[in-house]
Image (cartoon, rainbow, N blue to C red):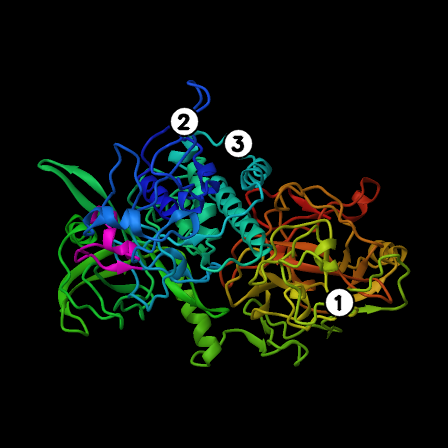
C-alpha cells in the first residue's frame, strides 16, 4: 500500500510533464507471496549442459550455505551458527526451528517507524473519510496535520514499516475497466495544458471518472471472497491509477481560485480534491507552496482542511480559528509535545504577513455514515491573527484566525442553517407544510414557498408507489433467490446476481455502480429480507427533501441533506396508464406530469458510456402523476442534470414489477435543485411536445420535450 501512498505524494507537487502509466504495477504480487525453493544439499548440483541456467534456489535462513555465501543479519549474530546448520532438524522446505525474530526488529529508520520524530502520527485518508471498504485500521506516519491517533488493529505489516497492509487484489483486468471508463468520458486526449490549468468541464469529467472507477473497483472487490487481513481501499487505488495515467487537472499549485472548482462543491474523499488541484496532500491539513523572495524562497499557505481532528473553532460560519500542525498526540487525541513553527505552521504565519488568500475546506459529519466525513469547499479566507495557546494537555498549540472574504456564495453557512431547521432552533422561511406526505414517507417532505402567495397544491394526493389499473402481461417472471440472510456479492450462484451480469448493481453502502439498460432487484418472489443489499430503492426516501416554489419554473425539488454520486433518491410514483391514453392526455389536455419510461437519454446524461441507449424494459411503462404521485413529479428538466433515471425490475413470480428509480449523477450539495433530463421523444412526435427550456445551464439547448 506504500506504493499507492508514495505515488500520490510524489505527484502532489505536479512534477514532470511526461506522464508514464505506472498503474499496472498495482497488480504485481509482492515477493512474500512467492514460495522459495530451498536446496536440500549443502552444494548446488551439476547441470547437464554448460550453457543451461541454474534453477532459482534459496538457501534456508540459517544454512546450509553454498561455498561463497554467508548468513545475513540477524542470523549471523547467533552463537554456534555452524553447529545449528548441521544438527538442526529440518521441517517443511528445509527450514529449521530457529527462534522467530519480529520483522520490526530489523526495521530501518529510513523505512519507517524506528525512532519516530516529533512529527504527528496521522491517519490515512480512508480513516479520516470513513467511506472505504477496509477491514483494518492502520497507522500511517504523516508529517502534516491529521486527526488524533486512534486505537489501531494493525495486521500483517511488511518489513520496512507499518504503513503497509495486505491489500486485496483482483483477477479482473482493472486496466481494461479503466480504459473503458476513460474512453467513455473522452479523456484519452487530456492534454498537458488541461492538466496544468483546468476548467469546469475538465474538473467535472475527472470527478465523474474517479467516482465511477472507485465504485467499479469496489464492486469487483465485493464480488470476491473476503481475505483475512486484507484491506480494501478503492478510493486510494482509483486515485492512484488516474494520477499515474495523467488524468488530473490544476496540477500547478496556485494561490486563490482553482479553475473549474466552485464554492459549495462537496467531496466524500480527499483524493478527489487532490485530483482536481483544490488541495494537493491526501492526508495533510495544510497545503503550501514556495514563493521566491529576495533572500531565496519562503512557504505560503494555499489551502487548509479543517476536519475537526484538532481543537479548531468553526462555530462561526464566516470565521475559523484553526489549530496548527505537528506535535505528538496520545491515544486520547491530546497533544503531548509542543508544536513548532515549521512546515505548514510557518506557511500560515508567512501568509498572515503577506495577506494572501487561503482556500478553506471544512469537514462535516455525514449523518448517513457515523464514521464518514464530507468536505465542503467554503471559498477564500485571509488570516487575520495568530497566537500560541495552551492545548487541553498543557502543550503549546499554534492558533490562526481566518476570516471569509465577503461577496462569495454561501457554502458552510447553508449547512448550519439546515441543521438549525432540523433541530428547531430556527424557523424555515416560507414554510407552508411541515410534511407534504402526511406520514406516507418515513422522512417528512417540506413544502416551501418564499416567492409568492400560493399556499398549497390543488387537487393533488401524495402516494409513494405505483398504481396499476390492470395486470401487465409480460414474460419477465422469475422465481427469485433463496438468500435467506440477504444477497452476498461473492455468491455467484444467486440468480439475482446472475441476472445483473455477475455482480450486485450496488456497492456495500448502497451506491449504484453504473447506469444500465435495466437493473434487477430482489422482489416479492425472493427469500431475502427487506434490508438485502439488492433492495436499495424499496425502502422509501433516505434524504430530507423539500418541494419549493421556483421563480420561473413552478415547483421544484431539492434536498436538505448532501447526496453522494450514485445514491438512490426516489422512484417515480403515480398511475400506470396505456401509451395511447398518454398521447391523448398529453396532446389534448396538455398534461405535464406524464413520465414515459421508453424515453432516450440525451447525450452526456448517462454515465459509463451508456448514453443515447433506449432503456431495456419488458413493456412500455407510462406513469401519470398529475393528481396522485410522489416527490419525483416535482423535479424539473435541465440540460445539465444532476440526477438520472434508471429502470428497475423487481423479481416477481406472478407479474411484471417494473419501476423507475432516480439516482444522483454527481455529488449534490444541500439546497441544490434536483433535476433530470426529460429525454428525447420520437421525431414524429417532437413538434407536439416541444417547450422552451429555462434551466439556465451553460449547455442549455433552449428547449425540452
Q: Residue 485 appears at what percent x and percent y? A: 66, 71
289 to 367, vertically: above or below: above
How far apart in space, not on screen, are marks 3 and 1 (Cα)?
Answer: 41 Å
Q: How many marks?
A: 3
* Mark identifier at residue 46: 2
Above or below residue 626? Residue 705 is: above
Of residues 196 and 200, the one drawn nearer to the viewer in this rendering = 196
Q: Is residue 320 above or below residue 614?
A: below
Q: Residue at x 36, y 42 (%)?
A: 7
Residue 454, image x and y in percent?
A: 63, 72
Secondary structure beneath label 1? loop
- Label 1 sits on residue: 523
Query: Which quadrant of the structure image shows residue 148?
Result: bottom left
Residue ID for mark 3: 188
Describe residue 265's horizontal placement relative to residue 316 as left or right.
right
Circle 2 SS class = loop
Query: Dot 1, how many residues are within 10 Å of its Cα: few (below 14), some (14-19), or many (20+)?
Result: many
Q: Which mark is residue 333?
A: none
The answer for how far apart the CA atoms under marks 2 and 3 are is 54 Å
Residue found 80% across the figure and 40% down from its top: 683
Residue 559, quarter of picture: bottom right
- Please tell me which of labels 2 and 3 falls first in the chain: 2
> Which residues are drawn in magenta?
100-122
**Callouts 2 and 3 close, C-beta under 8 Å:** no
Q: CA distance from mark 2 to mark 1?
A: 68 Å
In this view of the protein, which residue sits in the foreground, 254 or 35? 35
Check disc 2: other Cα within 10 Å, few if <14, some if 14-19, many if 20+. few
Asked if residue 119 lies in the magenta stretch, the reply is: yes
Q: Main secondary structure of the magenta part?
A: loop
Amino acid at each position: 500500500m506504500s506504493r499507492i501512498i508514495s505515488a500520490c505524494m510524489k505527484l502532489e507537487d505536479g512534477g514532470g510533464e511526461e506522464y508514464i502509466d505506472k498503474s499496472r504495477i498495482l497488480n504485481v504480487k509482492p515477493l512474500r507471496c512467492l514460495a522459495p525453493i530451498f536446496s536440500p544439499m549443502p552444494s548446488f548440483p551439476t547441470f547437464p549442459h554448460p550453457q543451461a541456467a541454474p534453477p532459482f534456489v534459496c538457501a534456508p535462513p540459517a544454512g546450509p550455505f553454498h561455498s561463497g555465501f554467508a548468513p545475513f543479519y540477524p542470523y549471523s549474530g547467533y552463537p554456534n551458527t555452524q553447529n545449528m546448520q548441521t544438527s538442526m532438524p529440518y521441517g517443511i522446505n528445509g527450514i529449521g526451528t530457529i527462534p522467530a525474530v519480529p520483522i520490526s526488529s530489523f526495521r530501518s529508520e529510513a523505512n519507517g517507524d524506528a525512532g519516530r520524530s516529533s512529527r504527528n502520527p496521522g491517519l490515512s485518508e480512508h480513516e479520516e473519510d470513513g467511506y472505504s471498504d477496509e477491514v483494518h485500521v492502520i497507522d500511517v506516519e504523516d508529517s502534516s496535520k491529521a486527526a488524533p491517533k486512534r486505537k489501531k488493529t494493525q495486521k500483517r505489516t511488511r518489513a520496512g514499516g507499518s504503513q503497509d497492509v495486505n491489500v486485496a487484489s483482483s483477477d479482473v483486468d482493472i486496466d481494461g475497466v479503466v480504459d473503458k471508463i476513460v474512453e467513455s468520458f473522452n479523456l484519452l486526449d487530456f492534454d498537458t495544458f488541461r492538466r496544468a490549468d483546468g476548467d469546469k468541464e475538465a474538473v467535472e469529467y475527472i470527478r465523474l471518472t474517479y467516482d465511477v472507477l472507485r465504485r467499479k473497483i469496489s464492486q469487483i472487490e465485493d464480488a470476491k471472497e473476503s481475505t483475512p487481513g486484507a484491506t480494501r481501499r478503492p478510493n486510494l487505488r482509483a486515485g492512484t491509477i488516474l494520477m499515474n495515467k495523467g488524468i488530473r487537472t490544476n496540477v500547478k499549485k496556485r494561490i486563490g481560485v482553482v479553475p473549474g472548482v466552485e464554492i459549495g462543491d462537496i467531496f466524500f474523499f480527499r483524493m478527489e480534491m487532490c485530483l482536481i488541484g483544490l488541495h494537493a496532500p491526501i492526508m495533510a491539513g495544510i497545503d503550501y507552496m514556495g514563493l521566491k523572495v529576495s533572500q531565496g524562497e519562503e512557504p505560503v499557505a494555499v489551502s487548509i482542511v479543517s476536519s475537526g481532528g484538532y481543537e479548531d473553532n468553526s462555530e462561526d460560519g464566516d470565521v475559523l480559528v484553526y489549530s496548527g500542525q505537528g506535535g505528538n498526540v496520545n491515544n486520547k487525541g491530546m497533544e503531548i509535545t509542543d508544536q513548532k513553527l515549521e512546515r505548514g505552521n510557518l506557511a500560515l504565519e508567512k501568509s498572515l504577513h503577506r495577506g494572501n488568500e487561503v482556500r478553506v475546506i471544512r469537514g462535516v459529519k455525514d449523518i448517513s455514515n457515523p464514521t464518514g466525513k464530507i468536505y465542503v469547499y467554503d471559498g477564500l479566507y485571509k488570516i487575520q491573527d495568530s497566537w500560541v495557546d495552551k492545548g487541553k494537555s498543557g502543550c503549546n498549540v499554534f492558533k490562526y484566525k481566518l476570516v471569509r472574504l465577503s461577496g462569495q456564495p454561501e457554502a458552510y453557512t447553508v449547512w448550519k442553517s439546515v441543521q438549525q431547521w432540523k433541530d428547531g432552533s430556527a424557523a424555515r422561511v416560507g414554510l407552508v407544510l411541515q410534511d407534504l406526505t402526511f406520514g406516507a414517507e418515513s422522512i417528512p417532505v417540506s413544502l416551501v414557498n418564499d416567492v409568492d402567495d400560493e399556499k398549497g397544491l390543488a387537487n393533488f394526493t401524495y402516494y409513494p408507489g405505483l398504481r396499476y389499473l390492470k395486470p401487465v402481461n409480460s414474460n419477465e417472471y422469475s422465481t427469485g433467490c433463496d438468500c435467506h440472510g440477504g444477497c452476498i456479492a461473492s455468491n455467484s450462484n444467486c440468480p439475482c446476481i446472475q441476472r445483473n451480469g455477475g455482480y450486485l448493481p450496488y456497492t456495500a453502502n448502497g451506491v449504484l455502480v453504473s447506469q444500465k439498460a435495466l437493473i434487477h432487484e430482489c422482489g416479492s418472489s425472493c427469500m431475502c429480507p427487506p434490508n438485502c443489499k439488492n433492495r436499495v430503492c424499496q425502502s422509501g426516501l433516505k434524504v430530507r427533501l423539500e418541494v419549493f416554489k421556483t421563480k420561473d419554473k413552478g415547483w421544484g425539488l431539492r434536498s436538505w441533506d448532501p447526496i453522494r454520486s450514485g445514491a438512490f433518491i426516489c422512484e417515480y410514483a403515480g398511475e400506470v396508464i396505456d401509451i395511447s391514453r398518454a398521447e391523448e392526455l398529453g396532446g389534448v389536455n396538455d398534461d405535464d406530469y406524464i413520465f414515459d419510461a421508453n424515453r432516450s437519454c440525451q447525450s452526456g446524461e448517462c454515465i459509463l458510456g451508456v448514453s443515447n441507449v433506449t432503456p431495456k424494459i419488458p413493456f412500455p411503462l407510462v406513469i401519470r402523476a398529475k393528481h396522485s404521485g410522489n416527490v419525483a413529479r416535482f423535479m424539473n428538466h435541465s440540460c445539465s442534470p444532476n440526477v438520472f433515471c434508471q429502470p428497475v425490475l423487481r423479481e416477481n413470480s406472478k407479474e411484471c414489477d417494473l419501476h423507475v428509480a432516480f439516482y444522483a449523477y454527481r455529488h449534490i450539495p444541500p439546497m441544490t435543485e434536483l433535476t433530470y433530463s426529460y429525454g428525447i421523444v420520437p421525431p414524429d412526435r417532437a413538434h407536439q411536445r416541444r417547450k422552451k427550456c429555462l434551466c439556465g445551464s451553460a449547455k442549455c439547448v433552449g428547449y425540452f420535450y
